[in-house]
């Protein structure tokens, strides 16, 4: 017997992605997929519906165009079609900012969390130029308190237990042979160069880059991703210059990663942003880690949802089983 579609108002979790392979990573982490619902008039989004850790989830992807404007349109249409959404996630890839304080590596995940005067995501290109330099203007809303509490609980649990990213990724890879694109690349392809060493633009890869300019990092005890918590910088341009990256950090503060669309979503609704790290926001940026980074972000989202009671109300913070 074919499963009957659920009602629009049964969906309480929204996940938005910028690119198809990010959306597919979340889609194939779903515990099960639901039948489609008819498209409502005026809504140009196409949705994937399903269940994730007991929550009814609606998943949408930007329509082939990136940036804050496209993201805002998707968020507005989604809210109109699915009026009961309580928890909103923006899930995808970003450029990490390793430092002495934050040992961020490719495939790791950054979860947006408030820090100082910022709500977790900073729109770094919104402001004004003054005689003293660029001054940021406006602030984006932090995630709802229960989501922040769930993140804090998960962060605390991971002090004594590993995150479940590799477990969820392994299960996903068994669903179809073409999903093998989400496998982890070799660890020796995770190369961080010193910030003052730029990539030769005439070379398509880093094979000819000076090995003496690599940052020497202590190997980790295991190959799975670590999860970091803090500020994410959002703007309309891809950051692949350490000069530009460091200039933004001087203006904003302790940024952990960069991405392009979250500010457009958060101008409309409070989202929590989860980014898998696929590059270091420098001139050595390449695409080798993109799929794996999308998968680790999707896995983190799935794990985080286990901390929130899927029952409609009152919302309760849970300890995952």
Image (spheres, grey):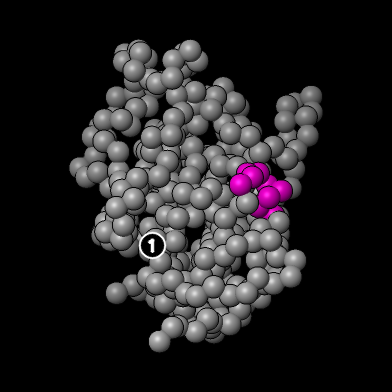
Q: Position of residue 191 (x, y in %)?
A: 34, 27
Nearer to the camera, 26 or 315: 26
Q: Position of residue 125 (x, y in %)?
A: 69, 37
Residue 65 on the magenta span:
yes
Range of the magenta residues?
64-72
Q: Residues within 10 Å of mark 1 (few under 14, many from 20)?
A: many
Kindly indicate the quadrant of the structure image that contains residue 78: bottom right
Q: What residue appears at the point 27 percent right and 59 percent down from the top-left corner?
A: 174
- Which quadrant does the C terminus fall into? bottom left
Residue 205, relative to residue 239: is it above or below? above
Q: Secondary structure at mark 1?
A: loop
Q: What residue appears at the point 38 percent right and 58 percent down from the top-left corner?
A: 299
Nearer to the camera, 246 or 212: 212
Q: In this rendering, does residue 58 appear at all?
A: yes
**Which residue is the extreme one toward the left?**
221
Residue hosting label 1: 29
């Amino acid at each position: 017997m074919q499963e009957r579609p659920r009602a629009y108002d049964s969906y309480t979790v929204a996940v938005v992605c910028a690119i198809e392979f990010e959306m597919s990573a979340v889609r194939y982490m779903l515990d099960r997929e639901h039948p489609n619902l008819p498209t409502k008039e005026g809504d140009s989004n196409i949705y994937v519906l399903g269940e994730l850790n007991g929550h009814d989830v609606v998943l949408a992807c930007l329509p082939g165009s990136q940036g804050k404007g496209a993201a805002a349109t998707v968020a507005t249409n989604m809210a109109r079609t699915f009026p009961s959404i309580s928890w909103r996630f923006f899930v995808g890839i970003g450029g990490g900012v390793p430092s002495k304080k934050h040992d961020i590596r490719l495939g790791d995940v950054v979860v947006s969390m408030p820090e100082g005067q910022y709500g977790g995501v900073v729109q770094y290109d919104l402001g004004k130029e003054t005689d003293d330099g660029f001054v940021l203007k406006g602030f984006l809303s932090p995630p709802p308190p229960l989501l922040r509490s769930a993140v804090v609980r998960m962060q605390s649990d991971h002090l004594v237990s590993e995150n479940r990213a590799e477990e969820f990724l392994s299960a996903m890879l068994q669903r179809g042979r073409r999903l093998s694109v989400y496998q982890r690349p070799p660890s020796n392809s995770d190369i961080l160069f010193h910030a003052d060493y730029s990539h030769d633009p005439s070379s398509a890869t880093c094979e000819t880059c000076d090995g003496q300019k690599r940052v020497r990092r202590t190997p980790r005890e295991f190959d799975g991703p670590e999860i970091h918590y803090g500020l994410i910088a959002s703007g309309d341009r891809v950051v692949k210059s350490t000069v530009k990256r460091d200039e933004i950090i001087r203006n904003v503060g302790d940024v952990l990663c960069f991405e392009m669309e979250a500010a457009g979503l958060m101008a409309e609704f409070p989202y929590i942003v989860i980014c898998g790290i696929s590059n270091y926001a420098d001139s050595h940026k390449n695409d080798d880690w993109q799929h794996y980074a999308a998968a680790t972000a999707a896995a983190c989202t799935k794990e985080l949802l286990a901390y929130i009671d899927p029952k409609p109300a009152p919302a309760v913070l849970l300890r995952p089983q």
